Image (cartoon, helix red, strand yellow):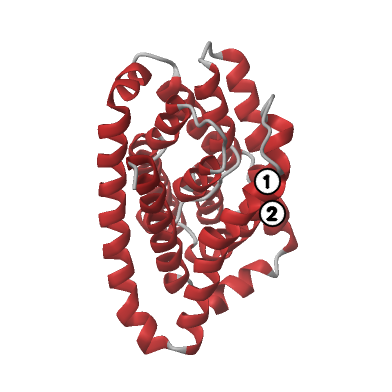
């Protein structure tokens, strides 16, 4: 087995463990309740699948990035909502029930819309929509559905499995980072001197600012949840998507790898900012 094949296996384990643990953490009743709001669902879809991809395209036009980094940013724009969203939403003191609804909505949207939109946004991409959709179905949607089903129909089993899957996800993440550093360390250093990181940070901050500012009648807690949902990214879905690319450019893989540690710093800062806003809102109400 080659190191590249081993890397693909690690990526699959990383995705299945992260999405499975996310399903085990979801509250189905709260999710269904929030999904009954057509307004919230429409806002999420517009921010994630209209504004997000369009903003990613705009950034690729504004910043002089090498083509593989630009392609990576377009994939970045097609994978909204990180599996770790509940962590940031709790930190931001935002609406957890809304976050619970937005997460599976984003996962289903990624599986359905990324394969359809990627060939339209990425010039010269020869991968078929089905070639992109198949691994997403197996490693993103299926683990999520299985996790939710266990959470609903076998609560005790789910409670025991959750810490195990989270532990496996953590190990897989570390192994993934080691693999990429060993295989593509030189490309990683090259990316640090490019606009790759700046593009990701600009995308996250832009999406967060736009979605929070234009809340269209949502309260502060809901706007914070929506903002975090549309500015965070699903690293697992991005890794799965690029594994179907023929002749994968190492710089593209590095761009996706950077989408794991770099954005986390920005997400933590945003969550702290929203938490401060939430505290201010509470003080105003008490007064």
Percent from the top left, x then y, of residue 151?
46, 81
Q: In this view, does 31 lie to the left or right of 4?
A: right
| Res 197 seen here | yes
Residue 41, labelled with which disc? none
**In the rendered image, the vertical position of residue 50 relative to residue 21, given as above or below:** above
Q: How crowded is mark 1: few (under 14 residues within 10 Å), some or many (20 or more)?
A: many
Write the residue at 40% across / 30% down. Answer: 254
| Left-right relation of 100 to 167 | right
Nearer the observer, 249 or 265: 249
- Residue toward you, 157 or 222: 157
In the rendered image of this protein, does residue 247 appear above or below residue 280? Answer: above
Residues at badges 1 and 2 in contact (C-beta under 8 Å)? Answer: yes
Viewer-proximal residue among 4 and 149: 4
Q: Residues within 10 Å of mark 2 (few under 14, many from 20)?
A: some
Tell me the CA gap for discs 1 and 2. 6 Å
259 shown above or below 24 = above
Specify whether residue 97 is in view. no
Secondary structure of residue under mark 1: helix
Residue at coordinates 44% horizontally, 17% vertically from top-left?
195
Looking at the rendered structure, the secondary structure element under dot 2 is helix
Q: Quadrant of the C terminus?
A: bottom left
The residue nearer to you, when weighing 137 against 151, is 137
Which residue is tagged 2? Answer: 112
Picture coordinates of residue 194, whole percent (x, y): 41, 15
- What residue lies at 52% left-to-right and 80% top-to-bottom? 149
Q: Name the residue under label 1.
A: 115
């Amino acid at each position: 087995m080659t190191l590249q094949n081993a890397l693909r296996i690690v990526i699959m384990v990383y995705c299945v463990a992260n999405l499975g643990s996310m399903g085990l953490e979801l509250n189905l009743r709260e999710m269904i309740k929030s999904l009954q709001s057509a307004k919230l669902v429409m806002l999420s879809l517009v921010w994630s699948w209209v504004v997000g991809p369009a903003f990613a395209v705009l950034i690729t036009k504004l910043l002089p990035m090498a083509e593989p980094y630009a392609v990576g940013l377009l994939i970045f724009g097609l994978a909204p909502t990180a599996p770790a969203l509940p962590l940031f939403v709790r930190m931001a003191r935002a609406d957890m029930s809304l976050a619970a609804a937005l997460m599976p909505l984003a996962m289903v949207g990624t599986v359905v819309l990324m394969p359809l939109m990627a060939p339209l946004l990425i010039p010269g991409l020869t991968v078929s929509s089905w070639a992109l959709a198949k691994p997403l179905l197996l490693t993103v949607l299926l683990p999520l559905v299985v996790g939710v089903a266990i959470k609903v129909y076998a609560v005790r089993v789910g409670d025991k499995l959750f810490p195990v899957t989270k532990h496996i996800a953590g190990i897989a993440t570390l192994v993934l980072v080691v693999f990429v550093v060993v295989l593509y360390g030189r490309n990683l250093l090259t990316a640090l001197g490019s606009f790759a990181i700046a593009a990701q940070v600009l995308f996250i901050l832009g999406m967060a600012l736009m979605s929070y500012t234009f809340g269209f009648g949502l309260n502060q807690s809901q706007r914070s949840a929506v903002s975090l949902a549309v500015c965070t990214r699903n690293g697992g879905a991005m890794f799965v998507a690029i594994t179907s690319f023929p002749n994968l450019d190492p710089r593209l893989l590095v761009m996706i790898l950077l989408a794991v540690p770099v954005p986390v710093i920005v997400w933590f800062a945003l969550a702290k900012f929203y938490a401060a806003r939430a505290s201010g809102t509470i003080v105003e109400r008490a007064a």
